[in-house]
Image: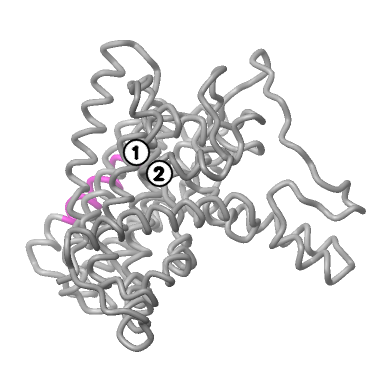
Amino acid sequence: MKVDYIALSVPVFFILIGIELVYNFYKKLNYYRLNDSIANLSQGIGQQLTGIFMKTALFFGYKYIFEHWRFFELPKTIWVWILLFICVDFFYYWFHRMSHQINALWAAHIVHHQSEEYNLTVALRQSWFQGWFSWVFYLPLAFLGFDPIMFLTLSSFNTLYQFWIHTRAIKTMGPLEYILNTPSHHRVHHGSNPKYIDKNHAGTLIIWDRLFGTLQKEEEEVYFGITKPLASWNPVWANIHYWNDLVKTARQSPKITDKIKVFIKPPGWFPAHLGGFQTAPEINPITYKKYNPIYQSKLTGYILVQFVVALVAGSAILFSYTKMQTIPLVGATLFTMFTLISCGALLEQRKWQIRFEYVRLSLGIAMIILLKFPISYQVIFVGIQLISVIWFFNLQKANPNPDEN
């Protein structure tokens, strides 16, 4: 039986985020910002929803190889489970390392590194498209004869392990630092400091970084994020912005070989006529500034409510999509995505956000009625949307020009 352990762990994720948030306020640590956290969680919701439409196909790719082309018959003993755990972690290391060294892979993985904060919400900031290629790195395990359900289980737990290491609340863990991937190791991995870039690619075991020369201890202060800041809360743009950069660079390159190299060379590589390889700049603590655009403070409550609507809708889809027909599933998913986009636009005070919000709210009402969801769902959802329309109208009436804020 295929169990989605990550989906089942979502409530635990939010409980732990809540605990860290309370600790953050108690200690006055400033580990969290509302806009950044909403952006991180939006990426996680989007990743889970887009994954619905491809995870089954990718699983059956592994399953097909196992059933038709495997080399060995491996028993489901404790020793095989242990061996598979080590193998999954080993292949994760190489998938992760290559995702930092090949532009086309980095274009997807970069999403996880865009946050300029470091807290448990960052763990949920995941690419919507990374799953399209990450599974390829694990195919040797199918050929070797490791059962698909065993593989899926251990790869899920490898991912789950990495949730808790996205924290600044835990400094070091003594002797465990030599064996396990820890918060300290992973903070380095998320650093944009030149000495920290492309280090500590481990999943669960840090031994791979020790063996293959990519280990870096946490020393000076870590500046989180990417070398060219995203500077946006838009979840769609977060997933395509680096692709946009690569395409632009390729178009500026007259040589076919350079066009190809743009996608297979490491981040920072440019053709000679565009200046050649560009190293990561050193960070000046004096001039360093996080992306933090001003928005109407009166919108905070409204944005939080809309985000909760997206969270509830996304969770409902995630736990019931197997029972949903295609059109309602697509419609509900699109509404959730539009809501996440709207939250980002409101936090950025984009010029188009007012019209977009009215269109989103109207489409939400039309969708729930036309797609014939259960009456109880229609009453609750339409009520929330109508209240939101009135609430948003009053907010805009009180402050009609977002550019003034």
Furthest-bottom residue in view?
68
Q: Nearer the viewer, residue 158 or 283?
A: 158
Extreme-left residue of the structure = 376
For the point 21% across and 61% down, the residue is 4
Amino acid, disc 2: Cys
Residue 248 in the image: x percent, y percent? Answer: 75, 59
Residue at the limit of the structure toward the right, as seen here? 273
In this picture, residue 387 sits left or right of residue 254: left
Viewer-proximal residue, 69 or 345?
Answer: 69
395 left or right of 403?
A: left
Q: State the residue position of label 1.
A: 303
**Distance between the alpha carbons at the discs numbered 1 and 2:** 6 Å
Residue appearing at x 21%, y 51% in the figure: 312
Tell me, yes or no, whether the two marked residues, 1 and 2, touch with CB atoms within 8 Å.
yes
Residue pointed to by mark 2: 343
The x and y percentages for residue 278 are: 79, 41
Q: Residues within 10 Å of mark 1 (few under 14, many from 20)?
A: many
Check the picture and name the quadrant holding the N terminus.
bottom left
Q: Which residues are magenta?
A: 381-392
Secondary structure category for the residue under label 1: helix
Residue 385 colored magenta?
A: yes
